[in-house]
Amino acid sequence: MHYGRPVSLDAPGHDDIANIGFVVGDRCVAVIDTGGSVRIGGELRTAVAEHARVPICFVVNTHVHVDHVLGNKAFEADHPQFVGAARLAAAMERNRPYFVEHFGEDLAPPVSGAEILGPDRLVADTLELDLGGRRLTLQAWPIAHSDCDLTVLDRKTRSLWTGDLLVRDRLPAVDGSASGWLKVLDRLNQMQVDRTVPGHGGLIHELHTAVESERRYLVALVEGVRRELTQGQSMQHAIDRVALSERPRWLLWESTHPGNVARVYKQLEWE
């Protein structure tokens, strides 16, 4: 697997910031996320060829964000099944024009929406993938980090790939529902695994500690915004004051936290 760096999407190297990798079975390989460009996807494909003598049968995307999906095109010639949560197809279609406009340099020329490959196999709840002597359990989740989050459990090694439902060091980014995310974290916290591959940051050996760290921030975010709304404060007032005790614990605060507060503020003001 490859561990991404704590870089913003608007910074140099933004296409190589997510954790991506693959699982090898006796029959075939499943790739899990493909990076933020066709170039990174191609490097991952080369790594698969160096470590496996069986074909790639699945490319699994954990959610819609560019740093996890734009490398899909590099695997098209392998003719795998592209797999994602049930809402991923619609999310890819909805975001395709934005991806082309803002991340066209990360695609292969000639740049067009056709270069952004979405799923052809969708997971409404759970799905088992058999790689030959190795089974993966895919789980689709309610709206949390995004509206199309998916986790992958490698049963042989008890390794859990969480996508951005769980991140390490890098501040969690709310693109879905913070309240829904907290409920999903409670369910993840009940899982018994030996290691966890987060969407960003190093390998996690203690799932419960990582979940509690992320949960602490999201609770402070939701409760802080709700308090600001109760007091009749503006969104900017909330951005300047909510969850500030969490700031020293996370990277990319300035680029991520204001957007989190704004999204939660808009959601909670209609409660």
Image (cartoon, helix red, strand yellow):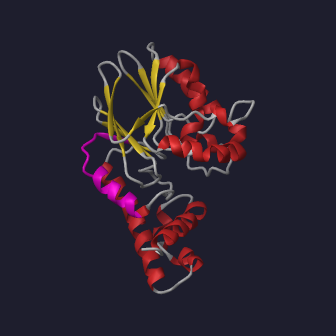
Residue extending furthest toward the top: 53
Image location (x, y in percent) of residue 162? 40, 44
Q: Which is nearer the eye, 256 or 150?
A: 150
Left or right of 159, for residue 47 = right
Q: Where, quadrant-wise, is the C terminus in this rendering? A: bottom left
**Residue displayed at 65% across by 32% down:** 115
**Residue displayed at 53% across by 58% down:** 251
Left or right of 96, for residue 178 = left
Q: Which residues are magenta?
A: 179-196
Q: How many marks?
A: 0
**Residue displayed at 28% across by 39% down:** 194
Q: Quadrant of residue 85?
A: top left
Image location (x, y in percent) of residue 114? 65, 32
67 to 41, vertically: above or below: below
185 to 119, vertically: above or below: below
Left or right of 209, for residue 23 = right
Q: Is residue 185 magenta?
A: yes
Q: Is residue 28 magenta?
A: no
From this viewpoint, is residue 256 visible? yes
From this viewpoint, is residue 1 visible? no
Residue extending furthest toward the right: 110
80 to 117, vertically: above or below: above
Image location (x, y in percent) of residue 224? 44, 76
Image location (x, y in percent) of residue 87? 46, 45
79 to 63, vertically: above or below: above
Q: Which is nearer the eye, 48 or 204?
A: 48
